[in-house]
Image (tube, rainbow, N blue to C red):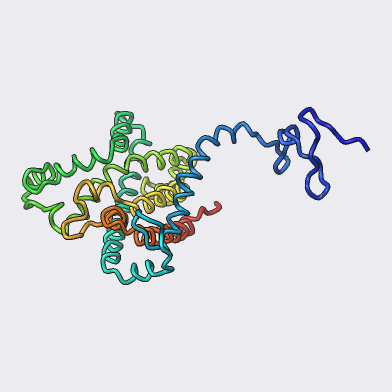
Amino acid sequence: MARKVTALGPARAAPGGGRPFSLAGLRRATWHGERIDWTAYLFVLPFFLPFLVVTLGAALFGFYVSFTDWGIIGAPHWIGVKNYVRAFTDPWVWKTWSNTLRYGLLVVPATTLAALAMALFVNLRWRGYTFARAAFYAPNVVSVTVIGLVWVWMLDTQFGLVNQYLGRFGVPDVPWLTNPKWVLYGIGMASVWWDAGFSMVVLLAGLQDIPHELRETAAIDGANRLQTLVHVILPLLRPALSLVVTLLIIGTLRVFSQIYIMTNGGPAGASASVIHYVYEIGFSKYQLGYAGAISVMLFVTILVLTVIQLRVFREKTF
């Protein structure tokens, strides 16, 4: 029997006696009845390959390192789960987790409420809303280094603008960044000011997808603005709120830059986050195995909290 030959040479039979493989057949490949557009995958490929090597590869290597004793020099020495046992008995791990969770409980609700208020204001399209939209979003395009340095100056106990304005109302000087009781509030204010703009854009997109007829119907039925917000707008805004809260939870659990620039974990470790402690352990003390174990624990925590949050904000069918 004559062997089938294609323009690219002899066709290779597929395993199991199926149809022969060829580039022409690959171009005509379908998925669920629709032809696969390979051009789109070619455009994604320049990003996807570095992602596999730099991000996914580094994550897998970090997971392996968490079971070893490694200080950069020499080969990693396998020690099993000793790093994880050490993490559960390390008081600094619990302290940084406590700081991170308290920081998240401050920043996530405050940023969400501020972003929602800004999005509602811009969506009303009152006079000056274009300027307001740009002003609300502007802090998000500024480098976190600049944000940190500006807020260090603004929150200075003696000469900061915040205390200067509070003093006009009779409020004594607040040690925002030098007192363990106030430091997370000071960093939280800077974070809310920096993050609220992006969250506003997400919520504004959700508000603009809500049909205006629903609000008019609610007004005809006698609902005031507050009732319309609670019973019409917020339920339909659930997907956007879910995305905003998810991103904020992940961001607060991974916070590092603001803390490193504004307080470097001080005073007395009162503002040290989990990532800040990982940085100190891994790149100051060169205990990369132990730092990897704490990082894996943080990843698992973020994954669990994200799944729980998505279930809480699960979109309802109306």
From this view, report whether residue 143 is shown above or below residue 104. Answer: above
Judged left or right of residue 163, residue 36 is right
Can you say which quadrant of the picture contains the N terminus? top right
Q: Nearer the viewer, residue 176 or 94?
A: 94
Residue at x 32%, y 43% (from the top left corner)? 196
Question: Of all residues shown, which one is farthest toward the front?
Answer: 74
Quadrant hosting residue 115: top left
Residue at 35% across / 54% down in the picture? 73
Note whether 278 is above or below 122 in the view shown. Answer: below
Residue under the point 45% across and 37% down: 208
Residue 11 found in image quarter = top right
Residue 194 in view: yes
Q: 50 or 251: which is nearer to us? A: 50
**How many marks overall?**
0
Q: Is 94 in front, or is 218? A: 94
| Residue 105 seen anywhere in this rendered image of the structure | no
Pinpoint residue 230: horizontal percent, then vertical percent: 40, 51
Determine the image quadrant of residue 87. Answer: bottom left
x, y (%) of residue 174?
10, 53
Identify which residue is drawn at 43% across, 60% down.
300
Foreground pick, 229 / 155: 155
Residue occupying the far right of the picture: 1
User: Would residue 156 appear left or right of 196 to someone viewing this image?
Assistant: left
Point out residue 232 in the picture as x, y percentages from the top left corner: 45, 48
Q: Where's residue 6, x and y in %?
A: 81, 30
